[in-house]
Image (cartoon, rainbow, N blue to C red):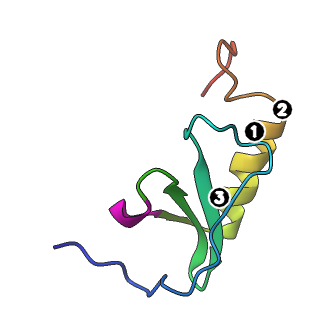
Amino acid sequence: MMTTPHDVSDAQWRKSSRSSSNGQCVEVAALPAGIGVRDSKAPDAGHLTLTPEAWDAFMTRARFGHYDRGAADST
């Protein structure tokens, strides 16, 4: 059985207000070790923990459309 290095049972997970009703969403939470990201359809399947710097870099790229479907530069 896999365990997480920290307890996330008290984490306040939240979804974007722009998430659609099709269930394809992620949730995020502020964790002691960084920013937690998990699949909203399978919250017990685990999560990723990103450093605040990695989260900021991800969000910056997302704001500029780097992850949009069909984006020319998706790296």
Dot 3 amino acid type: Ala
Q: Earlier in the sequence, mark 3 or mark 2?
A: 3
Judging depth in this view, the residue of 19 and 35 nearest the camera is 19
Coordinates of residue 64 in the picture (x, y in percent)? 83, 32
Magenta span: 43-47
For image coordinates 16% across by 73% down, the residue present is 1
Dot 3: within a 10 Å radius of its alpha carbon, few (fewer than 14), some, or many (20 or more) residues? few
Residue depicted at 61% across the width and 58% down the height: 27
Residue carrying label 3: 54
- Crowdedness of circle 2 by 10 Å Cα count: few (<14), some, many (20+)? few
Q: What amino acid is labelled 2 in the image?
A: Phe
Callout count:
3
Question: Element type at marker 1?
Answer: helix
Q: Is 59 displayed left or right of 1 in the figure? A: right
Depicted 67 relative to depicted 56: above or below: above
Is residue 4 left or right of 1 when viewed as pictured?
right
Q: Which residue is mark 1?
A: 61
Determine whether 71 is above or below 1 in the image: above
Q: Callout 1: few (<14), some (14-19), or many (20+) C-alpha neighbours within 10 Å? A: some
> Residue 6, image x and y in percent?
43, 86
Q: Which mark is residue 64?
A: 2
User: What number is the disc on residue 30?
Assistant: none
Q: Residue at x 61, y 75 (%)?
A: 34
